[in-house]
Image: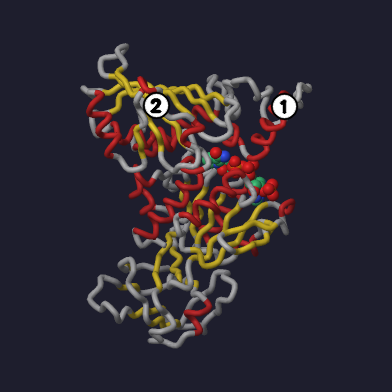
């Protein structure tokens, strides 16, 4: 167990002495001889505030172990991180971060709607990918996907396929997250999870980096991203609360079919095509009713209180991200026949004056938000004019005269980007920026 450890992000690690360590599954790692302790020497900045005294579980990259101590040329730059394990013990890992040797990343759900966008966004944002494993179910094994100029064969998600990954992004199912999440964390890796499995766990940060990026600091190997309607809402509410405290929020959503996955998008396509040909529409399989030419006030399953799980996710996750455990909140989530981009009509009540001009200025100043608000010229965000963008677009901002201090707005976000892939990658960037990866 690491009982004493600290290091500054980016400190070059120039020598590692290993007397005792147990490798934790990385392909190509070696188990050093028994007996002794683990030391690291940061000769580049001897005054840096680092020290660690003991590591029971250590994973070293193949190259690090093979290189002799003090081999400056070989270990160009390495980062050290400590990951608290579920048991309370700690895993200490050394991750090579030289220009030629980025992170070992796995994507579970690479063949899905979010997975495809993830690969685009990772390339656009220059995620430091050293090795990339693309994983899904056995159904997709062998299918080839492109990442930058590489063609990578998809593999079935197994323990072996995940072995030694530094960072795992999971955009699959809650069951897959539950199956693999604890194992990834126990092995000293980090899971950034797109699904709902862990979002409300007290030891799992739920993060929108522009809102609560600091919450990545207390992760224990799993970090969740919010539901795709919650992320933009939390972002906008966070900007607005700089003007006045939030008192109550109500929202109605208009959610695109890709929010329900690739098969749901294919269902809308097939129904629209049949309609265009004047044929009978294929029976719904992904939704409880025909989605083409329709609106369904039904996203995810209904709970006993009459709300859907999607609506409860929105409420609970918004509260957790904003650190407002009691924020009064109610919503109605609807699925509409658009492909990409979730829209929301939101009413916010403040506990103090919140002039629209000040709210507008707060939104304009906030990272990740773009005002698109000139109703007289028919300028406002729609799914079609915002898809493919990472920002959350806000329009129709106006006062709500039905309450003492109220505002109403309309916002639209690409559910596959900021609602999923981009937010996940931003969390990885936040970890890197904070020296946690
Ligand atoms: N779509 C969105 O807007 C959005 C936004 C935020 C979060 N999310 C979350 O992201 C996740 C994926 O959504 P999606 O829309 O991309 O779904 P999707 O299009 O249905 O894709 C699901 C992916 O997961 C894989 N998969 C399914 N079961 C698996 C298992 N047991 N083990 C490993 N891989 C498995 C599938 O592989 P095969 O191709 O082999 O079946 C496919 O790659 C969900 O948890 C969803 O809640 C989605």
User: Can you see residue 173?
Assistant: no
Q: Tell me the residue at 51%/32% (across/down).
A: 384
Locate residue 150, reporting x and y percent: 60, 64
Q: Nearer the viewer, residue 235 or 186?
A: 235
Callout 1: few (<14), some (14-19), or many (20+) C-alpha neighbours within 10 Å?
some
Which label was assigned to residue 284? Answer: 1
**Image depth: mark 1 or mark 2 in front:** 2
Quarter of the picture holding the C terminus: bottom left
Q: Quadrant of ligand 1?
A: top right
Res. 304 image quadrant: top right
Callout 2 secondary element = loop
Position of 4 compared to 390: left or right? left
Question: For residue 352, which quarter of the picture?
Answer: top left
**What is the x, y in percent for residue 203?**
43, 48
In whole angstroms, how far apart are the C-alphas of marks 1 and 2?
Answer: 35 Å
Residue 379 badge: 2
Q: Nearer the viewer, residue 339 or 255?
A: 339
Q: Kindly identify the residue that appears in the image at 51 percent across and 67 percent down.
A: 130
Q: Which comes sooner in the sequence, label 1 or label 2?
A: 1
Give coordinates of residue 357: x percent, y percent: 23, 26
């Amino acid at each position: 167990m690491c009982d004493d450890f600290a290091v500054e992000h980016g400190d070059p690690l120039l020598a590692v002495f290993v007397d005792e360590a147990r490798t934790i599954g990385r392909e190509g790692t070696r188990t050093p001889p028994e007996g002794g302790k683990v030391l690291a020497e940061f000769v580049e900045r001897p005054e840096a505030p680092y020290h660690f005294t003991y590591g029971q579980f250590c994973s070293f990259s193949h190259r690090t172990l093979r290189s002799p101590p003090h081999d400056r040329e070989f270990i160009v730059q390495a980062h050290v991180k400590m990951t608290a394990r579920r048991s309370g013990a700690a895993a200490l890992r050394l991750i090579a971060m030289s220009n030629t040797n980025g992170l070992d990343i796995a994507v579970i759900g690479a063949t899905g709607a979010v997975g495809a966008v993830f690969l685009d966004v990772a390339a656009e944002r220059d995620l430091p990918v050293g090795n990339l494993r693309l994983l899904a179910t056995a159904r997709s094994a062998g299918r080839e996907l492109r990442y930058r100029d590489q063609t990578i064969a998809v593999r079935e998600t197994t323990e072996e396929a995940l072995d030694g990954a530094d960072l795992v992004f999971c955009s699959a199912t809650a069951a897959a997250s539950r199956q693999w999440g604890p194992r990834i964390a126990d092995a000293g890796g980090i899971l950034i999870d797109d699904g709902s499995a862990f979002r409300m766990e007290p030891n799992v940060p739920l993060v929108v980096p522009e809102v609560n990026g600091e919450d990545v600091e207390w992760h224990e190997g799993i970090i969740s991203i919010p539901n795709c309607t919650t992320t933009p809402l939390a972002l906008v509410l966070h900007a607005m609360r700089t003007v006045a405290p939030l008192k109550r929020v109500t929202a109605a959503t208009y959610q695109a079919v890709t929010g329900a996955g690739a098969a749901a998008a294919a269902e809308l396509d097939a129904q629209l095509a049949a309609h265009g040909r004047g044929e009978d529409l294929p029976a719904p399989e992904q939704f409880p009713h025909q989605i083409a030419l329709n609106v369904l006030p039904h996203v995810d399953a209904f709970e006993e209180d009459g709300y859907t799980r999607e609506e409860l996710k929105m409420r609970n996750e918004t509260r957790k991200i904003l650190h407002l455990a009691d924020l009064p909140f109610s919503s109605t989530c609807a699925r509409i026949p658009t492909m990409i981009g979730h829209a929301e009509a939101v009413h916010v009540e403040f506990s103090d004056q919140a002039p629209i001009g000040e709210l507008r200025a707060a939104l304009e100043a906030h990272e990740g938000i773009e005002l698109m608000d000139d109703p007289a010229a028919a300028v406002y965000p729609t799914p079609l004019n915002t898809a493919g963008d990472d920002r959350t677009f806000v329009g129709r901002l106006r006062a709500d005269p039905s309450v003492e201090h109220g505002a109403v707005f309309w916002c639209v976000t690409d559910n596959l980007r900021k609602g999923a892939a981009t937010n996940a990658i931003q969390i990885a960037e936040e970890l890197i920026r904070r020296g946690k990866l």
